[in-house]
């Protein structure tokens, strides 16, 4: 794998982890059939994240990217509320 491939993969994995966290933040806000599908999505996202973490051995680079993306999401969320 090239360096660019590794960067792209780490960015994808970190983005997915951010997606999973955003799903968790919305938990409980749906009802009916949508809630069932949403809960299924959360379950799959958790399983996928666990596998990712096993494959990457909790790499510091991945954690840095993840933390940076979450900081950006939090900032965008703050700006959206203003």
Image: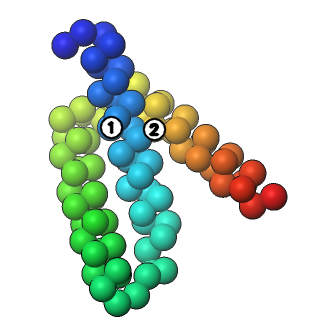
Where is residue 35 shown, x and y percent of the image? Answer: 35, 81
- Contact? badges 2 and 1 (CB < 8 Å): yes
Residue occupying the point 29% across, 27% down = 9
Q: CA distance from mark 2 to mark 1?
A: 8 Å
Name the residue at the bottom extreme: 32
**Residue labelled with disc 1:** 13
Q: Is residue 70 above or below residue 1?
A: below
Name the residue at the top extreme: 2
User: In this rendering, would 66 be left or right of 82?
Assistant: left
Label 2 or label 1, whichever comes before in sequence order: 1
Q: Which mark is residue 73?
A: none
User: In this rendering, would 21 be left or right of 71?
Assistant: left
**Residue labelled with disc 2:** 66
Q: Is residue 48 above or below residue 6?
A: below
Crowd rating for badge 1 (residues with CA inside 10 Å; few <14, some 14–19, many 20+) = many
Image quadrant for the N terminus?
top left
The colour style of the image is rainbow
Residue occupying the point 48% across, 80% down = 29
Q: Quadrant of residue 2?
A: top left
* Residue 62 appears in view: no
Q: Quadrant of residue 12?
A: top left
Where is residue 19 shown, x and y percent of the image? Answer: 41, 52
**Front-lying residue, 74 or 38:** 38
Where is residue 41 shown, x and y percent of the image? Answer: 28, 66
Name the residue at the right extreme: 82
Secondary structure at numbered mark 1: helix
* Residue 32 appears in view: yes
Image quadrant for the C terminus?
bottom right
Q: Is residue 42 above or below residue 70?
A: below
Q: Quadrant of residue 14?
A: top left
């Amino acid at each position: 794998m090239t360096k660019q491939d590794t960067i792209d993969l780490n960015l994808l994995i970190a983005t997915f982890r951010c997606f999973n966290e955003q799903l968790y933040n919305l938990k409980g806000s749906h009802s009916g059939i949508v809630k069932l599908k949403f809960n299924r999505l959360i379950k799959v996202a958790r399983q996928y994240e666990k596998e990712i973490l096993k494959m990457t051995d909790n790499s510091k680079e991945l954690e840095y990217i993840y933390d940076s993306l979450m900081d950006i999401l939090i900032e965008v969320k703050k700006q959206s509320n203003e």
